[in-house]
Image (cartoon, rainbow, N blue to C red):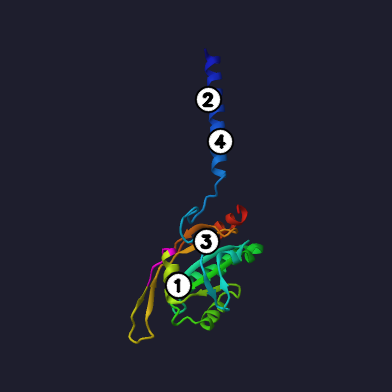
């Protein structure tokens, strides 16, 4: 009887190990991201915008790179410069893969953010980062597709207004497919780790 119980215990243990291995195999098949996984979303699939050099752009232009896309404006006092500075740090953490990161900054303030202003703003962070813009009506359509909120908050003078806007970023994989949404303030290290996963699992 003792021997039978021992055999039952061994069989049960073997079954447990097999189950754990199976579950682990299933888990390993899908990357575990820190950011919100939006793979398969039916929005924010592409865009038609112009970069600060006057070149028309779409997500297809950045094939082979992980794209991080953020909506903001150059006179933003905190969220925008912080986000761009963090992306500079992320690029450093990626090391040799840093050139596979493409940061895109979409202005929600095209009235003040001219191509020259946008180009100068990007130069403060990284020369490979691109700022994108569109005419107000086209911008509104893009923002709607990306579920991005923005609204002018009037200032003391006609030109001293600020822009309230969404503060998260969209992340595309190397094939131009939307994969992640990362909230503002999520941290540099988790974002870098997520991008490494996307580079490893295209």
How far is mark 4 from mark 2, CA to CA? 15 Å
How far is mark 3 from mark 4, CA to CA? 30 Å
- Which of pointers 3 and 2 indicates the residue nearer the eye? 3
Locate residue 145 relative to residue 101 in the image: left or right. left
- Which of pointers 1 and 3 indicates the residue nearer the eye? 1
Label 1 close to label 3 by CB (< 8 Å): no
Task: Give the mark, 3 or 4, whose residue is nearer the N terminus.
Answer: 4
| Residue at disc 1, secondary structure | helix
| Residue at disc 2, secondary structure | helix
How far from the left and from the top, in percent, is residue 86?
52, 68
Quadrant (top left, top right, bottom left, bottom right) of the C terminus: bottom right
- Numbered badge on residue 12: 2
Residue under label 1? 138
How far is mark 3 from mark 2, CA to CA? 44 Å
How far from the left and from the top, in percent, is residue 117?
51, 82
| Residue ID at (53%, 74%) | 50
Task: Give the mark, 4 or 2, whose residue is nearer the N terminus.
Answer: 2
Residue under label 4? 22
Point out the stretch of residues depicted in magenta. 145-150
Q: Nearer the viewer, residue 10 or 149?
A: 149
- Which of pointers 2 and 1 indicates the residue nearer the eye? 1
How far is mark 1 from mark 4, CA to CA? 49 Å
């Amino acid at each position: 009887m003792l021997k039978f119980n021992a055999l039952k215990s061994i069989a049960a243990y073997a079954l447990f190990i097999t189950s754990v291995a199976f579950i682990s195999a299933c888990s390993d098949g899908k990357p575990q991201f820190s950011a919100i996984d939006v793979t398969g979303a039916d929005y924010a699939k592409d865009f038609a915008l112009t970069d600060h050099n006057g070149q028309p752009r779409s997500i297809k232009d950045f094939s082979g790179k992980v794209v991080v896309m953020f909506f903001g404006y150059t006179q933003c006092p905190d969220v925008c410069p912080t986000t761009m500075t963090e992306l500079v740090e992320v690029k450093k953490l990626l090391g040799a893969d840093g050139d596979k990161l493409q940061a895109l900054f979409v202005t929600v303030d095209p009235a003040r953010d001219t191509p020259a202003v946008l180009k100068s703003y990007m130069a403060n962070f990284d020369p490979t980062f691109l700022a994108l813009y569109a005419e107000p009506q086209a911008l509104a359509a893009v923002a709607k597709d990306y579920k991005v909120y923005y609204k002018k908050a009037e200032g003391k003078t006609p030109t001293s207004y600020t822009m309230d806007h969404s503060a998260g970023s969209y992340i595309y994989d190397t094939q131009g497919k939307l994969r992640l949404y990362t909230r503002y303030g999520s941290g540099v290290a988790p974002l870098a780790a997520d991008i490494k996963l996307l580079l490893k699992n295209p």
